[in-house]
Image: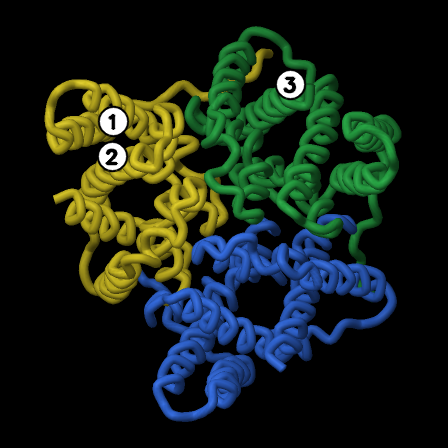
Chain colours: A green, B yellow, C blue
Amino acid sequence: MLYWLDLFGTIVFAISGCLIAGRRRMDLFGVMVVSLATAIGGGTFRDLILGATPVFWVRDPIYIQLSLLTSLLVFWSARRINVDLYGLKYADALGLAVFTIIGTQKALSYGSGPTIAIMMGIMTGVMGGMIRDLLCAQVPMVLRREIYAAASLMGAAVYLGLLALPIPVELSMLLSALVTLSIRVLAIRRNLSLPTFRFHN
Amino acid sequence: MLYWLDLFGTIVFAISGCLIAGRRRMDLFGVMVVSLATAIGGGTFRDLILGATPVFWVRDPIYIQLSLLTSLLVFWSARRINVDLYGLKYADALGLAVFTIIGTQKALSYGSGPTIAIMMGIMTGVMGGMIRDLLCAQVPMVLRREIYAAASLMGAAVYLGLLALPIPVELSMLLSALVTLSIRVLAIRRNLSLPTFRFHN
Amino acid sequence: MLYWLDLFGTIVFAISGCLIAGRRRMDLFGVMVVSLATAIGGGTFRDLILGATPVFWVRDPIYIQLSLLTSLLVFWSARRINVDLYGLKYADALGLAVFTIIGTQKALSYGSGPTIAIMMGIMTGVMGGMIRDLLCAQVPMVLRREIYAAASLMGAAVYLGLLALPIPVELSMLLSALVTLSIRVLAIRRNLSLPTFRFHN
C-alpha cells in the first residue's frame, strides 16, 4: 500500500517538475532532468545524509523509469490537452503527505531520534520542489508562499506521537498522512500563509 | 589511456568553468571554485549516490591539483591572450565523451543495472556544467540548448550494447566515446537541438 | 573548548542566514531553512564527501536545535530591535575561523592528505554561505567579493604547518584560527579584495 502511494507521489512530483520546467521553455532533456530531480531529489538527499547508500533509486530503478515515462507523456500531451493546474495542487498535497511519512519512517528505521526523523520527513517532502525551483533559477516557492512545509512538519510530528500509542503502524501512517493532507488542502482553499520576515525600521 | 583522457577531460571542464565564471566578473577565488565544481561536480555526485565514498578526488587529489592549476593559468592568461571559445566547444565534446564512459563503467563496477549505469554516465558528463551554471545564477545551459546530454545518453547506451559482444572492453570504450563525440560535434556544426516544451493553447 | 566554539559558529552562521533570507521577504519556514542550510551546509557536504555518514548533525542533533532556535529568535526580534549588521561581520569572521580548523582536523582524522584537508577546511567554512546565496537565487557573495575564502585557506595551511612542530594540538588550533580571523578582520577594515577575472580585449 505505502509502496503504491510512493510510486503515485513520484508520478505527481514528476508532473509538477515538468510543468514548472515547461514555463522556462526548456527542451525535452531539460524537462526530463527537472522532472526527475523533483521526483527523487528529496529522498536522495535523505539517503545520502543518513548514509543509506546506494540511494533508494539505485536499488530499485522503477522510480527513475516511472519518472522519465511520466515526463515524456506530459511533454507530448501538454501540446495537445489542457492540463488542470488546479487539480495538480491537490495531487501534489497527497504526494507531500506520503513522502513525509516515508521519510520519517526511513530515518527512524536508521536509528534517528525525533528531531532528525521529523527533519528527514520534511526534507523528503519538500526538497524535490526546492531543487526544481533552483534549476529554474528562482527562489524556491516553498520558502516564500503558503503553508507547505508546515503541513509536512505537522504530519511527521503527529506520526511520532501516534507511534507511542498501542495502535498498528499502518493506522499511524494513515492518520498522520491525513493530517498533512488536511492542513495543506485547507491552506490551498483558504489561501493561508505564514508570517514573513520583517526588518525593524 | 582512459586515465589520461580523464585528466584531459578534467582540464577541459576546468577551463570552461573559468570562462563562464569570468563573464560574471568573479574574483580569483570565485573562478577557482566554479572551475573546480565544473571539473569534479559530476563525478562527485555519482560517487555519493553509488556510495563510493570517500569520493574519487579524495582518494587521488591529482584531480583537484590539476583543476586549480588550470584555473590559475586561465585566470592570468585570459588577460593576455585571446581564448578561442570555438575550439573549446570541441575539446568540451571530447571531455563529455570520456566522462560519460567513465561514469557508466564505474556504475557497472558497483553492480548497477542498465538504467542506473546510463544515468550515472550522463550525470558524470553533464552535472559539472549544471553546477557551474547554478553558481552563476542562471538556468543550466544543458537544460535549454542544443543536443548535449542526448549525445551522452547515446554513448552510454551504445557502450552497454557493445559490452554484450565478444570484443575487448577497450574497443567498446573507444567506439562508444566516438558515438558521443560524433553526435555532439554534429550538433555543434549543424546547430541541432531538441524540441522544447510547449503548453497547449 | 572547540565544541563550544563550534556551537558559537553555528549560531553566528544561522543568524547570517536569517538576515539574508529576510531581505528576500521569505516566510517563517523559508527563513528557518536558509538559516539551517547556512549553519550546517558546509559540514554536511564535508561529511558526505569524506564518507563520514550519517553526517555530524544526525549523530548530535544539538546543531539543528540550536540553529532553529536561533532563527526563531532572530525572526521575532528583527521586528523589534535594530540588528547590528556591522558587528555580525566580525562574529561571522570568528565562525569562519572555527569552522575552517574543525573541517581541516576532521579530514585529517579520516586520513586525508594536505590538499584534501585544506579543501575540506575551506568547504566547511564557506559552503554554508554559498548554499544560503543559491537559495536566495543570487551569485554567491564569496565568489565575488572581499577576501573571505582566502582567509580560510591561510588558516588551514598554517594549521597543517604547525602540526609538524612539537607544540600541543590545542595551541596549533588557536594560532591558526587567529590567522584566519586576523586576515578576515583586516579585509573587512581595509576593504581588501582579490583581483577579478578580466578577458583580453
Residue at numbered disc 1: B155
**Observer-nearest of C42 and B129:** C42
Instruction: Determine if marks 3 and 2 fall on one subunit.
Output: no
Q: Give residue C11's quadrant in the image.
A: bottom right
Residue at numbered disc 3: A4
Q: Residue furthest top?
A: A80
As shown in the figure, which amino acid type bears the numbered disc 2? Answer: Ile
Image quarter where the C terminus of chain C lies is: bottom left
Please state the horizontal and vertical placement of residue B92, each as a whole percent of the image: 24, 41
State which tag comes first along the sequence, 2 or 1: 2
Asked if disc 2 and disc 1 are in contact, CB closer than 8 Å, the reply is yes
Image quarter where the N terminus of chain C lies is: bottom right
Residue found at x 47% / y 63%: C123
As shown in the figure, which amino acid type bears the numbered disc 1? Answer: Gly
Mark 1 secondary-structure assignment: helix
Disc marking residue B101 = 2
In the rendered image of this protein, does residue B201 appear above or below residue A193?
above
Please state the horizontal and vertical placement of residue B74, each as a whole percent of the image: 25, 60
Mark 2 secondary-structure assignment: helix
Measured in 3D between alpha carbons, the distance from the residue under mark 3 to the one under mark 2, in whole angstroms, is 34 Å
In the rendered structure, the residue with mark 3 lies on which chain?
A
Residue B60 in view: yes
Please state the horizontal and vertical placement of residue C103, each as a whole percent of the image: 49, 69
Residue found at x 28% / y 22%: B157
Q: Give residue A89's quadrant in the image.
A: top right
Please state the horizontal and vertical placement of residue C64, each as a whole percent of the image: 69, 59
In the rendered structure, the residue with mark 2 lies on which chain?
B
Asked if disc 3 and disc 2 are in contact, CB closer than 8 Å, the reply is no
Left or right of C136 in this view: A57: left
Measured in 3D between alpha carbons, the distance from the residue under mark 3 to the one under mark 1, in whole angstroms, is 34 Å
